[in-house]
Image (spheres, coloured by chain):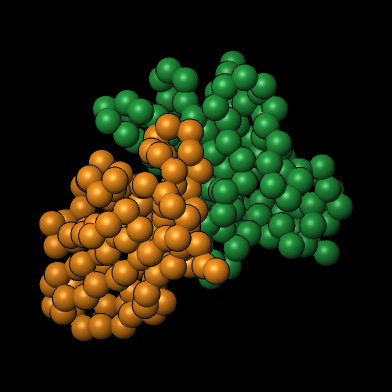
Amino acid sequence: DTAVSQTPKYLVTQMGNDKSIKCEQNLGHDTMYWYKQDSKKFLKIMFSYNNKELIINETVPNRFSPKSPDKAHLNLHINSLELGDSAVYFCASSHGLAGAYNEQFFGPGTRLTVL
Amino acid sequence: AQSVAQPEDQVNVAEGNPLTVKCTYSVSGNPYLFWYVQYPNRGLQFLLKYITGDNLVKGSYGFEAEFNKSQTSFHLKKPSALVSDSALYFCAWGALVNGNQFYFGTGTSLTVIP
């Protein structure tokens, strides 16, 4: 069984559209994250939720909105997509806060291409 | 600014030779340090972490890392490289400072040459 899953795996869309990426984990973790990996492979944390509460909210445009309906799910909604949003988005989960000493488990990534 | 640095974008090593992937940190207090690996077109996988205690940390797939406080380094090592070790390696640090912080280094691409 996949521990952290993301859908879709690939997403190709036009500028200005709104899209969502879904993430689910079956590890029983209480903390989930969204990361963006750009074309140079730089990884940056975007959001972190602990027990459905927003913990980390890095400086990202407010077009990005995370939604956590329960501890096992963290979805990412993006409004008014721009060319610069093209990247690979990774979901991750951990038991407890990553800023402590807990390793994260990553999903396979969603490659978003904005045309 | 608090951060980790990976000074080498690319490391090449011959199969069977020892490998080292470098990481230095600039973090006040006692950092929690991690190594992750990313194989092509995959998500990241945890390799090992340093919390406190023994400076030599052993992890998955025969990797280890040494925490060196005087040199502020946390280099990843393996005694004998395999072709299958070829991947992108990320150092990371975390701290419960100003809430919760977690940052990855810029990554080092390791190529093991047969």
Q: Residue furthest right?
A: B16
Q: What residue is rendered at 39% in x and 35% in y?
A: A99
Chain represented in green: B
Q: Residue sitting at 69 percent across and 60 percent down?
A: B86
Quadrant containing the C terminus of chain B is: bottom right
Q: Look at 13% across and 57% down and name the residue there.
A: A62
Which of the pair B106/A93 is nearer the observer? Answer: A93
Q: Colour of chain A?
A: orange
Residue B64 place in picture, x, y as percent: 71, 38
User: Would residue B105 be visible to someone looking at this image?
Assistant: no
Q: Is residue A68 visible?
A: yes
Left or right: A22 in relation to B110: left
The image position of residue A110, as x and y in percent, is 39, 71
Left/right placement of residue B59 relative to residue B50 reads right
Would residue B2 appear left or right of B80 to someone viewing this image?
left
A99 vs A112: above or below: above
